[in-house]
Image: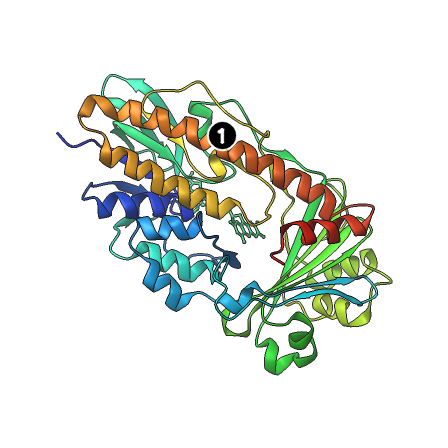
Amino acid sequence: MRHRIAVIGGGPAGLTFARVLHRHGHPVTILERDPAPDARPPGGTLDLHEGMGQLALEKAGLVAEFQELSRPEGQAMRILDADGTVLRDWQPRPDERANPEIDRGQLRDLLLGPLDVQWGRDVTEVVPGTRDGVLVRFADGRQETFDLVIGADGAWSRVRPAISSATPHYTGITSVETSLDDVDTRHPGLARLIGDGSMAVYGVNRALVAQRNSGGHVKVGAQFRAPLDWHAGLDLADVEAVRSSLLALFDGWAAPVLDLLRHGTAFAHRPLYVLPVSHTWTHVPGVTLLGDAAHLMPPLGAGANLAMLEGAELAESIAAAPGPGDLDEAVRAFEEQMWARAGRWAKITAAGLERLVSPDPAQALAVFDEVQPS
Ligand SMILES: Cc1cc2nc3c(=O)[nH]c(=O)nc-3n(C[C@H](O)[C@H](O)[C@H](O)COP(=O)(O)OP(=O)(O)OC[C@H]3O[C@@H](n4cnc5c(N)ncnc54)[C@H](O)[C@@H]3O)c2cc1C
């Protein structure tokens, strides 16, 4: 008899899991809260690492398509100081494929392929151990049961409380994101400053990061240390008020760098939350977590890669389980492997964030020198 398997969430973790399981001929129910794939902007660009996100795509049989879509030139990285002086300008070799970039929307569509996602399914609660299996409750009052429920529903997971009491906490560093369109024609000076990939500017307790997406679109993140309520009295929906407030926060920085904020079209406030480093739980039969739901960490290039690799590995473990009684053992073994690797990355990214948005901007440069290939 086939297992009834549900994955909650159609992000990188859930879709990679479903796609690899589908490749092995196993049915899986994909339950996603968004009403449609394009219901909200898909977000920026992701660099997929060899041996992580790229390995997951190999397991999904999607390497050739990824090579068509991805941007190896997006690996270029430029570091400036707050005066606008270029401190590092790293260009990838023409054959460099260690961390090519891909737009999130393109990755989502690539993973979706033949998958049949149930859109508009907002999960509110998961109850393990009922007579008929694991119960999933939805916001519209419906409920369904499965043999295995996988929580790939991100930072504020509704599956996580079924197996862990951990909740994300604020890092003390927040981010305000904006974006620019048609940068090459509308803002050629900024386009040259940013280059083909990413540009990061580090000052005292502040950072401005600009990342090129495809089609001349640029995402900008203004990161700074601040209490969660730093915007008290500021209407976050008022674009000009947020712009003025950010320009005041980055006062004294070089004018070309501040143009990133002057030309931003809209602003979104995204405080950086994390789960405890080395988050684990006592194994609960029938429920597990993947990706940010299991190990939310600072956005330093690991989260989506881990999410995808975990999705692929869990799918392969389940597909390889010899009999129905072996499903739980496959999940248990996967969890041990996930916890060990994610724990290492959680430590690396937590330390990295502290140094990137730091009282001593030289620390940020040191981080770059440590991770960048020579
Ligand atoms: C600014 C920024 C830049 C980043 N850059 C990178 C990078 O370059 N490389 C990298 O590896 N990582 C990066 N990350 C981290 C990466 O975005 C995440 O780690 C990754 O998206 C996690 O994938 P996920 O599938 O676990 O969760 P998510 O991407 O959060 O997906 C969760 C899905 O679950 C759905 N969902 C949520 N709640 C419910 C519910 N109740 N019922 C049903 N569905 C639900 C959501 O709608 C969503 O589709 C970045 C993060 C940020 C914020």
* Residue 374: quarter of image: bottom right
Mark 1 lies on a secondary structure that is helix
Q: How is the image coloured?
A: rainbow
Q: Residue at x 55, y 28 (%)?
A: 278
Whether ligand 1 has any atom under 8 Å from the Cβ at mark 1 is answered as no
- Which residue is farthest bottom? 185
* Residue 248 pos. (x, y %): 83, 59
| Image quadrant assignment for residue 321 | top left
- 126 relative to 370 in the view: left or right: left
Give the labeled residue for mark 1: 340
Above/below status of 179 relative to 128: below
Q: Position of residue 36 (x, y in %)?
A: 36, 55
Task: Measuring from the top left, give residue 286's x and y in whole percent.
Answer: 31, 24
- Residue most extreme to the right: 252
Picture quarter with the N terminus = top left
Query: Where 336 falls versus 202 (above or below)?
Result: above
The kind of residue tagged 1 is Ala
Q: Residues within 10 Å of mark 1 (few under 14, many from 20)?
A: few
Disc count in the image?
Answer: 1
* Residue at position x 43%, y 50% in the image: 53
Question: Which quadrant of the structure image shows residue 13?
Answer: top left
Residue nearest the observer in this picture, 313 or 165? 313
Residue 361 at what x, y percent from top left? 80, 51
* View extreme (front): residue: 374
Q: Nearer the viewer, residue 350 or 144?
A: 350
Residue, far left:
1
Report whether residue 43 is seen: no
Determine if residue 305 is in view: yes
Residue at position x 44%, y 65% from top? 70
